[in-house]
Amino acid sequence: MTPTALRSTVFILAAGLADLLAFTHDTHAADKYPTRPIRIVQGFSAGGVSDTLARIAGEKLGERLGQPVVVEGRSGGGGIVGMTTVAEATPDGYTLLLGQTSITIANSRTDKPRFDPMKEFVPVSMFGTAPSILLAHPSAPIKSVKDLIALAKAKPGTVNCATSGIGTTNDLGVHLLNSMTGGKIVPVPYKGSGPSMNAALGNETPLSFAPLLPAIPHVQNRRLVPLGMSGLKRNPVLPDVPAIAEEVPGYQADGFFGIVASRKVPKPIIERLHREFNAVLALPEIQKNFTRQGLEIEIMTIPQFAEFLERDAKRWSELVRKAGLVF
């Protein structure tokens, strides 16, 4: 063997040994994991859908792992503050993110985060998809999606609609409705679904496009008028509320919820978390609770979740391009 070939062989063996040692170290770390509390960061207001889902799943995860799971709200920037918190945390599996559309829309924004969320985070466990619901204050002269479209065309730019924040599913849902109908409803971003709901309840804005979960009691108590669901079909939680697609064929603006983590977290820990979260999602009580809150549970493998994220990013980037959105 020539000296050059020998050096090449030694280099390859050394690299292979380094990879083996790293894998062994990561596997050992996963075997001991977790040894302290786990933090799930959610990027919107306390009491909102992200906060609620994270707490429900986190409690059961903690029971399975034998460590407390703490949910921490870091609202702001349409989810960017929460994403940044997790991206800057030590990538050891103790800081996770309740991921949603803010991840898949980030690269279409003008005000991008300092990193690419689609590259920074890896999927851990998909929770499922959920529609938003378009709501009106009872005093508003809008009792249906048809009424809204007519008003938005007749008086463009005069109808305000509160949303959970720039780049959230319901914010994009307003833009999508404008794009498909030719109207001009003005989205007004708030820091989370709670504040956006309060805007309509207090008549700060005549409309709110909000996640289904926090809207249910206000619809049932008739404090807000439901105009339509953002999914392709009606939701069994509120079966009398029509889908927006019944008036605007093809309209769909569902959101998703799931757990993601820093790409630098050791793979064995990611796989452990994936198994544990999916086991939590399979529990009948969790399925009943999530379904009751309007979530359509979709238990996926890690590759399936990754493919879902890519598809979601593509559909929103196409909307941004087609509608000429700048945000």
Image (cartoon, grey):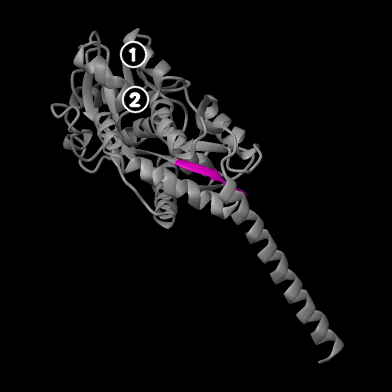
Helix, strand or loop for disc 2: strand
Q: Position of residue 130 (x, y in %)?
A: 31, 36
* Residue occupying image coordinates x 38% and y 13%: 199
Relative depth, front residue between 19 and 103: 19
Q: Quadrant of residue 36?
A: top right
Q: Position of residue 18 (x, y in %)?
A: 72, 65
* Residue occupying image coordinates x 17% and y 33%: 236
Q: Quadrant of residue 253?
A: top left
Residue beneath disc 1: 200
Q: Do callouts 2 and 1 mark residues in contact (Cβ within 8 Å)?
A: yes
Q: Residue furthest bottom?
A: 1
Where 267 sits versus 321, above or below? Answer: below
Q: Position of residue 57 (x, y in %)?
A: 40, 34
275 displayed left or right of 80:
left
Amino acid type, residue under disc 1 in the picture: Ala
90 displayed left or right of 156:
right
Where 140 sits versus 58, above or below? Answer: above
Q: Which mark is residue 210?
A: 2
166 displayed left or right of 206:
right
Q: Is residue 58 magenta?
A: no
Q: Which image quadrant: the N terminus?
A: bottom right
Relative depth, front residue between 71 and 170: 71
The mark tally for this picture is 2
* Residue occupying image coordinates x 28% and y 25%: 134
Q: Residue furthest left?
A: 240
Residue range (magenta): 259-265
Q: Is residue 260 magenta?
A: yes
Q: Quadrant of residue 91?
A: top right
152 displayed left or right of 168:
left
Relative depth, front residue between 30 and 290: 30
Q: CA distance from mark 2 to mark 1?
A: 10 Å
Amino acid type, residue under disc 2 in the picture: Ala
